[in-house]
């Protein structure tokens, strides 16, 4: 399956370069120049990966990324930007980026980063995660159970997705903390415990349970 990339880049020269070089490498690339166009494209058709310039003319790209993550969207994102100060790089990652590359960049390096991010992402995994009567639909970022939709907050959805992806295996508190950090939330292990407690109650009656493995983390299993 061809990998479809949406590039949000307001510099026409760089946009043309990306279209030419990434197309030559076999990617399918769409380009837009503003945050508003990017949001419209993402709603119309989800790409495999987003290349996002932080310095857009109508809005800061990091704000767009924060909204994506707050809405529970795990779309792989690489920030492309001329901002080369460490604080800006950290800011992009804290907003929820999977990686960060500073312009000007080498296409071969960008290609390697795209492939690495996609290997780590959900996009190579099944689009549905099912355990018991619990079903998480990745494209719609929603969970349904035996009695219909399960009301989860975006943060609870992120935690449950991580547990479902690793069903039958222990997910550490540190890993769940890292998952929530993608939403730009500064949390600790106690906060993770609160989210897991809430999720436990919301998914009851669906043939699954979240077990606490003391000293390690949590394990989701079928009953």
Image (cartoon, rainbow, N blue to C red):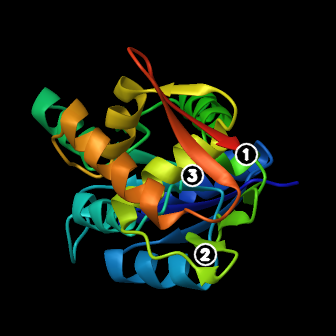
Q: Mark number for residue 140?
A: 2
Q: Is residue 81 visible?
A: no
Earlier along the polypeptide chain: callout 2 or callout 1? 2
In what element is the residue under mark 1? strand
Residue occupying image coordinates x 40% and y 73%:
33
Image quadrant for the N terminus?
bottom right
User: Mark 2 to mark 3: distance in Å?
Assistant: 29 Å
Image spot of residue 104 (x, y percent):
37, 36
Image spot of residue 194 (x, y percent):
26, 48
Residue occupying image coordinates x 29% and y 52%:
183
Which quadrant of the structure image shows residue 121? top right
112 and 196: which one is in front? 196
Earlier along the polypeptide chain: callout 3 or callout 1? 3
Image spot of residue 109 (x, y percent):
55, 26
Residue for badge 3: 18
Residue occupying image coordinates x 28% and y 61%:
66
Image spot of residue 99 (x, y percent):
42, 36
104 w.r.t. 223: above or below: above
Circle 2 packing at 10 Å, graded few (<14), some (14-19), many (20+), is few
Q: Is residue 120 visible?
A: yes
Residue for badge 1: 222
Residue positioned most to the top: 215
């Amino acid at each position: 399956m061809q990998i479809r990339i949406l590039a949000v880049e307001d510099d026409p020269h760089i946009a043309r370069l990306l279209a030419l070089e990434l197309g030559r490498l076999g990617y399918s690339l769409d380009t837009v120049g503003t945050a508003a166009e990017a949001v419209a494209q993402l709603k119309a058709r989800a790409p495999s990966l987003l290349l996002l310039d932080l310095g857009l003319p109508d809005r800061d790209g990091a704000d767009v990324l924060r909204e994506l993550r707050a809405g529970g969207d795990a779309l792989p994102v690489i920030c492309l930007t001329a901002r080369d100060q460490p604080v800006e790089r950290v800011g992009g990652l804290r907003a929820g980026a999977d990686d960060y590359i500073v312009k000007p960049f080498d296409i071969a390096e960008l290609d390697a980063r795209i492939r690495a991010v996609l290997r780590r992402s959900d996009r190579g995994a099944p689009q549905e995660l099912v355990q018991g009567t619990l079903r998480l639909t990745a494209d719609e970022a929603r969970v349904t159970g035996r009695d219909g939709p399960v009301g989860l907050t975006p943060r609870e959805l992120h935690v449950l997705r991580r547990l479902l992806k690793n069903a039958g295996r222990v997910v550490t508190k540190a890993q769940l903390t890292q998952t929530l950090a993608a939403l730009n939330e500064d949390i600790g292990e106690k906060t993770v415990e609160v989210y897991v407690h809430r999720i436990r109650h919301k998914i009851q009656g669906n043939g699954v349970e979240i077990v606490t493995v003391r000293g390690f983390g949590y394990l989701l299993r079928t009953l």
